[in-house]
Amino acid sequence: RKVVKIKTADFDELLAEGTALLALAGKDSPRLDAEILLSHALGIDRLELPLYAPLKIGHSAENLYVYGDHINRRAAGEPVAYIIGKKEFYKSAFFVNRSVMIPRPETEEMVEAILNRFDGHRRISLLDVGAGCGCIALSLVLERPDWKITACDVSPDALLVAKQNARNLGAGNVEFTLSDLFDAVNGKFDLIVSNPPYVDEKLSDTLQVEVREYEPSVALFAGDGGMKVIKTLVDRAADYLEPGGVFYCEIGYDQKEKVEKHFDENVWTDVEFSRDLAGNWRTVTAVCGMK
Protein backbone atom coordinates (compact mmCIF):
# COMPACT_ATOMS: atom_id res chain seq x y z
CA ARG A 1 0.00 0.00 0.00
CA LYS A 2 1.09 3.58 -0.51
CA VAL A 3 2.69 5.08 2.58
CA VAL A 4 1.54 8.63 3.22
CA LYS A 5 3.82 10.95 5.16
CA ILE A 6 2.32 13.75 7.19
CA LYS A 7 4.11 16.89 6.00
CA THR A 8 3.06 19.52 8.54
CA ALA A 9 3.20 20.20 12.25
CA ASP A 10 0.35 22.72 12.18
CA PHE A 11 -2.72 21.49 14.06
CA ASP A 12 -5.36 22.65 11.58
CA GLU A 13 -3.33 21.43 8.64
CA LEU A 14 -2.74 18.07 10.31
CA LEU A 15 -6.45 17.48 10.64
CA ALA A 16 -7.15 18.76 7.13
CA GLU A 17 -4.45 16.56 5.62
CA GLY A 18 -5.55 13.46 7.52
CA THR A 19 -9.19 14.12 6.62
CA ALA A 20 -8.34 14.56 2.94
CA LEU A 21 -6.33 11.33 2.84
CA LEU A 22 -9.12 9.35 4.47
CA ALA A 23 -11.74 10.92 2.21
CA LEU A 24 -9.62 9.96 -0.79
CA ALA A 25 -9.56 6.39 0.55
CA GLY A 26 -13.39 6.43 0.63
CA LYS A 27 -13.93 6.41 4.38
CA ASP A 28 -17.41 7.38 5.59
CA SER A 29 -16.38 9.76 8.39
CA PRO A 30 -12.92 11.04 7.47
CA ARG A 31 -12.92 14.15 9.70
CA LEU A 32 -14.11 12.28 12.79
CA ASP A 33 -11.63 9.46 12.17
CA ALA A 34 -8.79 11.96 11.77
CA GLU A 35 -9.72 13.70 15.01
CA ILE A 36 -9.87 10.43 16.94
CA LEU A 37 -6.57 9.21 15.50
CA LEU A 38 -4.80 12.51 16.16
CA SER A 39 -6.06 12.71 19.74
CA HIS A 40 -4.91 9.13 20.33
CA ALA A 41 -1.47 9.84 18.85
CA LEU A 42 -1.14 12.87 21.12
CA GLY A 43 -2.53 11.12 24.20
CA ILE A 44 -5.35 13.58 24.81
CA ASP A 45 -9.13 13.55 24.64
CA ARG A 46 -10.67 14.44 21.27
CA LEU A 47 -12.57 17.37 22.81
CA GLU A 48 -9.26 18.76 24.07
CA LEU A 49 -7.67 18.89 20.63
CA PRO A 50 -8.08 22.63 19.92
CA LEU A 51 -6.64 23.55 23.33
CA TYR A 52 -3.78 21.12 23.83
CA ALA A 53 -2.89 19.74 20.40
CA PRO A 54 -0.60 22.63 19.35
CA LEU A 55 1.47 22.16 22.52
CA LYS A 56 1.66 18.40 22.13
CA ILE A 57 2.53 18.56 18.43
CA GLY A 58 5.44 20.89 19.03
CA HIS A 59 6.78 18.78 21.88
CA SER A 60 7.68 15.63 19.95
CA ALA A 61 8.16 14.62 16.33
CA GLU A 62 7.19 11.09 17.40
CA ASN A 63 3.57 12.25 17.59
CA LEU A 64 3.58 13.08 13.90
CA TYR A 65 5.01 9.68 13.01
CA VAL A 66 2.35 7.90 15.08
CA TYR A 67 -0.43 10.01 13.57
CA GLY A 68 0.85 9.32 10.05
CA ASP A 69 0.93 5.60 10.80
CA HIS A 70 -2.62 5.75 12.18
CA ILE A 71 -3.86 7.53 9.05
CA ASN A 72 -2.18 4.99 6.78
CA ARG A 73 -3.66 2.06 8.66
CA ARG A 74 -7.14 3.60 8.56
CA ALA A 75 -6.82 4.42 4.85
CA ALA A 76 -5.95 0.77 4.19
CA GLY A 77 -9.18 -0.28 5.90
CA GLU A 78 -8.21 -1.07 9.49
CA PRO A 79 -11.04 -0.03 11.83
CA VAL A 80 -10.38 2.92 14.14
CA ALA A 81 -11.20 0.78 17.18
CA TYR A 82 -8.36 -1.62 16.43
CA ILE A 83 -5.91 1.19 15.76
CA ILE A 84 -6.56 2.92 19.08
CA GLY A 85 -7.32 -0.32 20.93
CA LYS A 86 -10.69 0.58 22.37
CA LYS A 87 -14.38 1.00 21.62
CA GLU A 88 -17.10 2.74 23.60
CA PHE A 89 -20.02 0.47 24.43
CA TYR A 90 -22.97 1.29 26.66
CA LYS A 91 -21.33 3.23 29.52
CA SER A 92 -17.74 1.99 29.28
CA ALA A 93 -14.69 1.91 27.03
CA PHE A 94 -13.68 -1.65 26.11
CA PHE A 95 -10.22 -2.76 25.09
CA VAL A 96 -10.39 -4.49 21.70
CA ASN A 97 -7.97 -6.12 19.32
CA ARG A 98 -8.32 -8.34 16.27
CA SER A 99 -9.15 -11.36 18.46
CA VAL A 100 -12.64 -9.95 19.06
CA MET A 101 -15.42 -8.30 17.14
CA ILE A 102 -15.85 -4.58 17.62
CA PRO A 103 -18.98 -3.97 19.74
CA ARG A 104 -21.92 -2.53 17.81
CA PRO A 105 -24.55 0.00 18.94
CA GLU A 106 -27.30 -2.53 18.11
CA THR A 107 -26.01 -4.80 20.85
CA GLU A 108 -26.30 -1.96 23.38
CA GLU A 109 -30.04 -2.10 22.80
CA MET A 110 -30.10 -5.73 23.96
CA VAL A 111 -28.24 -4.77 27.13
CA GLU A 112 -30.78 -2.03 27.80
CA ALA A 113 -33.70 -4.40 27.19
CA ILE A 114 -32.31 -6.93 29.68
CA LEU A 115 -31.78 -4.26 32.33
CA ASN A 116 -35.31 -2.95 31.81
CA ARG A 117 -36.77 -6.45 32.14
CA PHE A 118 -34.78 -7.53 35.20
CA ASP A 119 -34.40 -4.97 37.95
CA GLY A 120 -31.83 -5.17 40.70
CA HIS A 121 -34.12 -6.73 43.30
CA ARG A 122 -33.50 -10.31 42.22
CA ARG A 123 -30.13 -12.05 41.98
CA ILE A 124 -29.96 -13.39 38.44
CA SER A 125 -27.66 -16.12 37.15
CA LEU A 126 -26.69 -15.32 33.57
CA LEU A 127 -24.74 -17.06 30.82
CA ASP A 128 -23.23 -15.04 27.97
CA VAL A 129 -22.47 -17.41 25.08
CA GLY A 130 -19.78 -16.11 22.74
CA ALA A 131 -18.71 -13.28 25.02
CA GLY A 132 -16.04 -11.78 22.76
CA CYS A 133 -14.55 -8.73 24.45
CA GLY A 134 -17.06 -9.14 27.28
CA CYS A 135 -19.09 -6.05 26.43
CA ILE A 136 -22.48 -7.64 27.19
CA ALA A 137 -21.55 -9.55 30.34
CA LEU A 138 -19.45 -6.76 31.82
CA SER A 139 -21.94 -3.99 31.00
CA LEU A 140 -24.62 -6.01 32.78
CA VAL A 141 -22.58 -6.84 35.86
CA LEU A 142 -21.51 -3.22 36.26
CA GLU A 143 -25.20 -2.30 36.44
CA ARG A 144 -26.23 -5.39 38.43
CA PRO A 145 -23.23 -6.29 40.63
CA ASP A 146 -25.26 -8.89 42.56
CA TRP A 147 -25.86 -10.98 39.45
CA LYS A 148 -23.82 -14.15 38.99
CA ILE A 149 -22.50 -14.11 35.43
CA THR A 150 -20.67 -16.73 33.39
CA ALA A 151 -19.10 -15.62 30.10
CA CYS A 152 -17.88 -18.25 27.65
CA ASP A 153 -16.16 -18.17 24.30
CA VAL A 154 -14.55 -20.69 21.96
CA SER A 155 -11.52 -18.43 21.46
CA PRO A 156 -8.81 -18.37 24.15
CA ASP A 157 -7.57 -15.05 22.77
CA ALA A 158 -11.03 -13.52 23.04
CA LEU A 159 -11.27 -14.63 26.67
CA LEU A 160 -7.95 -12.92 27.39
CA VAL A 161 -9.42 -9.69 26.04
CA ALA A 162 -12.60 -10.13 28.11
CA LYS A 163 -10.58 -10.79 31.27
CA GLN A 164 -8.48 -7.70 30.60
CA ASN A 165 -11.67 -5.64 30.29
CA ALA A 166 -12.97 -7.07 33.56
CA ARG A 167 -9.76 -5.92 35.26
CA ASN A 168 -9.81 -2.53 33.56
CA LEU A 169 -13.42 -1.89 34.57
CA GLY A 170 -13.21 -3.38 38.04
CA ALA A 171 -16.00 -5.81 37.21
CA GLY A 172 -16.19 -8.72 39.63
CA ASN A 173 -18.61 -11.62 39.85
CA VAL A 174 -17.89 -12.83 36.31
CA GLU A 175 -16.57 -16.32 35.62
CA PHE A 176 -14.86 -16.82 32.26
CA THR A 177 -15.02 -20.24 30.61
CA LEU A 178 -13.42 -21.59 27.46
CA SER A 179 -16.29 -23.35 25.70
CA ASP A 180 -17.60 -24.06 22.22
CA LEU A 181 -21.14 -22.82 22.85
CA PHE A 182 -22.46 -24.99 25.72
CA ASP A 183 -19.89 -27.79 25.54
CA ALA A 184 -18.00 -26.86 28.73
CA VAL A 185 -20.90 -25.16 30.52
CA ASN A 186 -22.39 -26.65 33.67
CA GLY A 187 -25.54 -25.81 35.60
CA LYS A 188 -28.67 -23.89 34.79
CA PHE A 189 -29.29 -20.18 34.48
CA ASP A 190 -32.11 -17.66 34.77
CA LEU A 191 -30.97 -15.88 31.64
CA ILE A 192 -28.93 -16.80 28.59
CA VAL A 193 -27.77 -14.13 26.18
CA SER A 194 -25.80 -14.43 22.96
CA ASN A 195 -24.57 -12.33 20.08
CA PRO A 196 -23.53 -15.24 17.86
CA PRO A 197 -22.01 -15.31 14.37
CA TYR A 198 -24.93 -14.97 11.98
CA VAL A 199 -23.53 -13.66 8.68
CA ASP A 200 -23.81 -16.08 5.78
CA GLU A 201 -20.25 -17.21 5.07
CA LYS A 202 -21.00 -17.08 1.34
CA LEU A 203 -21.46 -13.30 1.60
CA SER A 204 -17.99 -12.55 2.95
CA ASP A 205 -16.83 -10.97 -0.33
CA THR A 206 -19.67 -8.45 -0.19
CA LEU A 207 -18.73 -7.02 3.20
CA GLN A 208 -16.71 -3.87 3.85
CA VAL A 209 -12.96 -4.38 4.01
CA GLU A 210 -13.07 -3.27 7.66
CA VAL A 211 -15.17 -6.31 8.50
CA ARG A 212 -13.97 -8.84 5.94
CA GLU A 213 -10.24 -8.47 6.45
CA TYR A 214 -9.88 -7.36 10.06
CA GLU A 215 -12.57 -8.81 12.32
CA PRO A 216 -12.35 -12.48 13.40
CA SER A 217 -14.26 -14.72 10.99
CA VAL A 218 -15.20 -17.17 13.76
CA ALA A 219 -17.23 -14.40 15.41
CA LEU A 220 -18.89 -13.27 12.17
CA PHE A 221 -19.70 -16.10 9.82
CA ALA A 222 -21.90 -19.15 10.11
CA GLY A 223 -22.92 -21.87 7.69
CA ASP A 224 -26.45 -22.76 6.63
CA GLY A 225 -27.12 -19.25 5.38
CA GLY A 226 -25.86 -17.76 8.64
CA MET A 227 -28.26 -19.85 10.72
CA LYS A 228 -26.04 -22.71 11.92
CA VAL A 229 -25.02 -21.29 15.29
CA ILE A 230 -28.40 -19.71 16.01
CA LYS A 231 -30.11 -23.06 15.40
CA THR A 232 -27.72 -24.79 17.79
CA LEU A 233 -28.36 -22.15 20.44
CA VAL A 234 -32.12 -22.50 20.12
CA ASP A 235 -31.89 -26.29 20.19
CA ARG A 236 -29.72 -26.41 23.32
CA ALA A 237 -30.39 -23.27 25.35
CA ALA A 238 -33.47 -24.66 27.11
CA ASP A 239 -31.34 -27.44 28.63
CA TYR A 240 -29.35 -24.77 30.44
CA LEU A 241 -32.26 -22.59 31.54
CA GLU A 242 -34.33 -22.81 34.68
CA PRO A 243 -38.09 -23.16 34.04
CA GLY A 244 -39.28 -19.68 33.11
CA GLY A 245 -35.74 -18.66 32.21
CA VAL A 246 -35.27 -16.23 29.33
CA PHE A 247 -33.16 -16.51 26.19
CA TYR A 248 -31.94 -13.41 24.33
CA CYS A 249 -30.20 -13.72 20.97
CA GLU A 250 -29.09 -11.19 18.38
CA ILE A 251 -29.99 -12.13 14.80
CA GLY A 252 -29.44 -10.90 11.26
CA TYR A 253 -31.82 -8.30 9.85
CA ASP A 254 -33.25 -10.81 7.34
CA GLN A 255 -33.45 -13.89 9.58
CA LYS A 256 -36.69 -13.34 11.53
CA GLU A 257 -38.84 -15.85 9.66
CA LYS A 258 -36.15 -18.56 9.68
CA VAL A 259 -35.46 -18.10 13.38
CA GLU A 260 -39.15 -17.99 14.29
CA LYS A 261 -39.79 -21.36 12.66
CA HIS A 262 -37.03 -22.99 14.66
CA PHE A 263 -38.53 -22.47 18.12
CA ASP A 264 -40.34 -25.61 19.29
CA GLU A 265 -43.66 -24.59 20.86
CA ASN A 266 -43.37 -27.53 23.24
CA VAL A 267 -40.16 -26.04 24.62
CA TRP A 268 -40.49 -22.27 24.23
CA THR A 269 -43.18 -19.69 24.97
CA ASP A 270 -43.49 -15.94 24.43
CA VAL A 271 -41.20 -15.83 21.41
CA GLU A 272 -40.81 -12.15 20.55
CA PHE A 273 -38.71 -10.17 18.09
CA SER A 274 -37.44 -6.61 18.50
CA ARG A 275 -36.22 -4.09 15.97
CA ASP A 276 -33.09 -1.99 16.38
CA LEU A 277 -33.02 1.79 16.07
CA ALA A 278 -32.50 1.45 12.32
CA GLY A 279 -35.79 -0.45 12.07
CA ASN A 280 -34.23 -3.86 11.36
CA TRP A 281 -35.15 -7.04 13.19
CA ARG A 282 -32.27 -7.57 15.60
CA THR A 283 -33.17 -9.55 18.73
CA VAL A 284 -35.26 -12.59 19.55
CA THR A 285 -36.44 -13.29 23.08
CA ALA A 286 -38.05 -16.51 24.32
CA VAL A 287 -39.09 -18.04 27.63
CA CYS A 288 -38.24 -21.61 28.53
CA GLY A 289 -41.52 -23.46 29.11
CA MET A 290 -39.93 -26.77 30.10
CA LYS A 291 -40.48 -28.03 33.65
Image (spheres, rainbow, N blue to C red):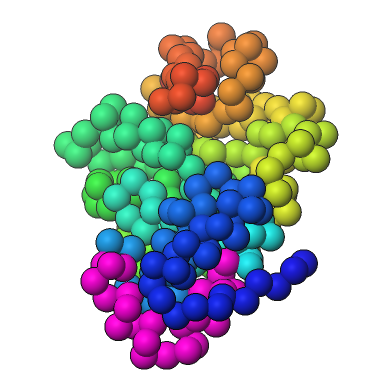
Query: Would residue 189 be counted in the magenta stretch?
Result: no
Q: Is residue 69 magenta?
A: yes
Q: Is residue 28 above or below residue 76?
A: above
Which residue is more in the foreground, 171 or 203?
A: 203
Query: Percent from the top left, x then y, of residue 60?
Result: 42, 90
User: Where, by quadrant of the figure, is residue 10 drawn?
Assistant: bottom left
Most extreme residue toward the bottom, as rendered?
60
Image coordinates for residue 190, horizontal then vertical, percent: 38, 34
Q: In terms of secondary structure, what is the magenta stretch mainly?
A: helix
At 31% from the left edge and 40% from the top edge, which residue is drawn?
Answer: 124
Left or right: 206 in relation to 77: right
Viewport quadrant of the N terminus: bottom right
| Closer-to-camera residue (175/62) | 62
Residue at 64% x, 30% y is 230
- Point out the stretch of residues depicted in magenta: 48-71
Please indicate, yes or no, whether residue 164 appears anywhere in the rendered image.
no
**Residue 285's spot in the image, x, y percent?**
46, 22
Quarter-of-image position of residue 181: top right
Q: Is residue 159 left or right of residue 91?
A: right
Q: Is residue 207 visible?
A: yes
Q: Residue furthest left?
A: 121
State the image quarter where residue 112 is shown.
Answer: top left
Does residue 8 appear left or right of residue 120 in this picture? right
